[in-house]
Image (cartoon, rainbow, N blue to C red):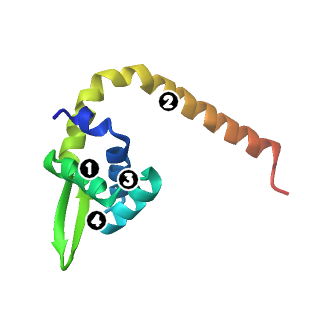
Amino acid sequence: MHAFDILGDPVRRRLLELLSDGERPAGELAALISEEFGISQPAVSQHLRVLRENGFASVRPEGTRRLYAVRGESLREADAWLSPFRRHWAPKLAALETEIARGKRARRNSNPKE
């Protein structure tokens, strides 16, 4: 399966977002995803399996729990594929950053500390 087939699913993207801060138990992930997306625990388990089998997540047992974590290799592959397209949005993001900085500076200058 291609990386973007995996990342194209909103449930799997959300699982990766939740895992971006570090390991999480499968039960916690299932509860959060079930609440957000209204899907069953077995459905969440299937999404976790797809992430695991395609190299986006790893799992390790800890007692009775299974802890999931992000595996960066597959995400780096997707990032590399996107690399040629960055030229389309990088300048716009840089311009936005400049405008935000100007706005902050203008607010600071209009409200000098007393």
Q: Is residue 27 above or below residue 54?
A: below
Q: Please identify, in this view, whether the residue under mark 4 or under mark 2 is nearer the observer.
A: 4
Q: Please identify, in this view, whether the residue under mark 4 or under mark 3 is nearer the observer.
A: 3
Q: Which residue is mark 4?
A: 26
Local SS, label 1: helix
Front residue of 112/80: it is 80
- In the image: residue 93, left or right of residue 66: right
Q: Quadrant location of residue 45? A: bottom left
- In the image: residue 2, left or right of residue 23: left
Local SS, label 3: loop
Alpha carbon distance from label 4 to label 2: 36 Å
Alpha carbon distance from label 1 to label 2: 32 Å
Q: Which residue is mark 1?
A: 47
Residue, far top: 88
Please report the residue visible at 36 percent of the width from the left and 67 percent of the height from the top.
28
- Which disc, if any, is residue 59? none
Alpha carbon distance from label 4 to label 1: 11 Å
Q: Which residue is mark 2?
A: 93
Residue 15 appears in the picture as rendered? yes
Alpha carbon distance from label 4 to label 3: 14 Å
Local SS, label 2: helix
Which amino acid does the dot numbered 1 rest on?
Answer: His
Alpha carbon distance from label 3 to label 2: 36 Å
Query: Is disc 3 surrounded by few (<14), some (14 to 19) or many (20+) residues within 10 Å?
Result: some
Q: Quadrant of the C terminus?
A: bottom right
